[in-house]
């Protein structure tokens, strides 16, 4: 696997983040949401590949409040999916939230996103409930979300 580094997202990353967001998610966050003011998210990190020029290929937004960690958004550039980068990014998110004092970590995932569910379960997340009609779909339908929880390491 290529060398990489993880660092806090910077304002200059917004163009790359936005492009990944639109390609990776069927209902992407807006540029305004992605360029959230400092302090809105405790943890916003980008995964950069070391090449002649560092290439941002993934990111996550998470927060920790009163001992509860929450993964708000995570994405890997689709051309890099299925190569283990999602695992690296998820491990980093879990580590950051544990260091921030999270006693549990929560997330929502589309019912149809089986690959993400398998990845989350590999790292100890368990489905605890379902949110009916949580996600918007491109065709106007609504899709359920699985709420998953992991007890901190």
Image (cartoon, helix red, strand yellow):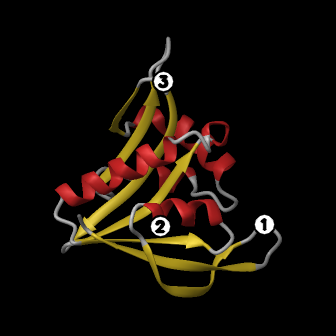
Rounded to the nearest whole Å, what is the CA distance between mark 1 and mark 3? Answer: 34 Å
Dot 2, how many residues are within 10 Å of its Cα: few (below 14), some (14-19), or many (20+)?
some
The mark nearer the N terminus, 1 or 3, is 3
Q: Quadrant of residue 16?
A: top right
Q: Secondary structure at mark 1?
A: loop
Nearer mark to the viewer, of 1 and 2: 2
Question: Which residue is more in the foreground, 56 or 12?
Answer: 56
Q: Is residue 79 above or below residue 32?
A: above
Residue 17: tell me if it is visible: yes
The residue located at (26%, 65%) in the rendering is 64
Label ID, residue 138: 1
Q: Position of residue 144 (x, y in %)?
A: 64, 81
Q: Which residue is mark 2?
A: 121
Label ID, residue 2: 3
19 lies left or right of 69? right
Q: Is residue 12 above or below residue 95?
A: above
Rounded to the nearest whole Å, what is the CA distance between mark 1 and mark 2? Answer: 27 Å
The mark nearer the N terminus, 3 or 2, is 3
Q: Position of residue 75 (x, y in %)?
A: 54, 50
Dot 1, how many residues are within 10 Å of its Cα: few (below 14), some (14-19), or many (20+)?
few
126 lies left or right of 40? right
Residue 35: tell me if it is visible: no
């Amino acid at each position: 696997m290529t060398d990489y580094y993880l660092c806090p997202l910077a304002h200059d990353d917004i163009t790359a983040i936005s492009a990944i967001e639109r390609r990776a998610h069927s209902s992407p966050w807006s540029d305004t949401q992605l360029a959230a003011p400092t302090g809105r998210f405790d943890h916003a990190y980008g995964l950069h590949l070391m090449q002649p020029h560092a290439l941002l290929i993934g990111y996550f937004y998470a927060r920790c409040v009163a001992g509860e960690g929450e993964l708000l958004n995570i994405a890997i550039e689709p051309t890099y999916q299925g190569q283990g980068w999602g695992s690296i990014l998820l491990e980093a998110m879990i580590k950051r939230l544990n260091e921030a004092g999270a006693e549990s970590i929560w997330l929502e995932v589309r019912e149809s996103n089986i690959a993400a569910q398998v990845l989350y379960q590999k790292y100890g997340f368990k489905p605890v409930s379902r949110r009916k009609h949580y996600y918007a779909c491109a065709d106007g339908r609504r899709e359920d979300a699985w709420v998953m929880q992991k007890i901190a390491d």
